[in-house]
Amino acid sequence: MVKTDKEWKKKLTPEQFKVLRQCGTEPPFSGKYVHHNEEGKYVCAACGNELFSSETKFKSGSGWPSFWDKVDEDAVETRVDTSHGMRRTEVICANCGGHLGHIFQDGPQPTGLRYCINSVALDFKKEDTEE
Ligand code: FE
């Protein structure tokens, strides 16, 4: 999915644009999903792509929603980010290329990974309940 900055600005809030398109980071503990515990899927706020499941969300204490795995193999991609004098691995939406956050190697088992994700880059979809 390729859109220009102008098109993204129309679709996203200024906060979403800053994180998703300009690799910004929301202040810790500011996001609406940090302490969010409902069962369901977290999707990309820009394109709706399913990214993470509540089943792999954990309390990291970092101030950002944290997951130890992605929802499936094709959900997200990673790339090296050397901005701000650090060498980190950036997590991006595999569908629209939007910046989501970073991945670290200090997560819980079974993966040992910590996907550290900005709340503003996410939307939440409750698990469908059987009628
Ligand atoms: Fe996306």
Image (cartoon, rainbow, N blue to C red):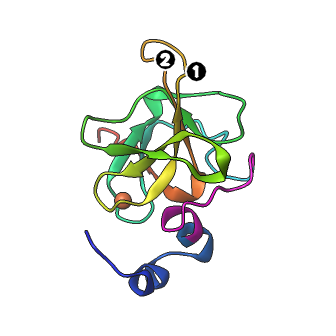
Q: Is residue 26 above or below residue 86?
A: below
Q: Is residue 45 left or right of residue 31?
A: left
Question: Which amino acid, mark 2?
Answer: Gly
Q: CA distance from mark 1 to mark 2?
A: 6 Å
Which label belongs to residue 106?
1
Tell me whether the residue at label 1 lies in contact with that at label 2, contact meaning CB atoms closer than 8 angstroms: yes
Residue pointed to by mark 2: 112
Quarter of the render that holds ligand 1:
bottom left
Q: Picture coordinates of residue 49 (x, y %)?
A: 32, 54
Q: Identify the residue shown where x is 49% and y is 17%.
A: 112
Q: Which percent across, then down, holds residue 120?
A: 58, 59
For the N terminus, the image quarter is bottom left
Range of residues picked out in magenta: 18-29
Is 101 magenta? The answer is no
Residue 35 location (% of width, % of height): 67, 39
In the image shown, does 103 or 119 lie closer to the viewer? 103
Residue at x-position 50% and y-position 75%:
12
From the viewer's perspective, is 42 left or right of 71? Answer: right
Q: Tell me what residue is drawn at x 35 percent, y 64 percent.
A: 47
Of the residues shown, which amino acid type is indicated by label 1? Answer: Asp
Q: Report the residue at 32% width, 62% height from top.
A: 96
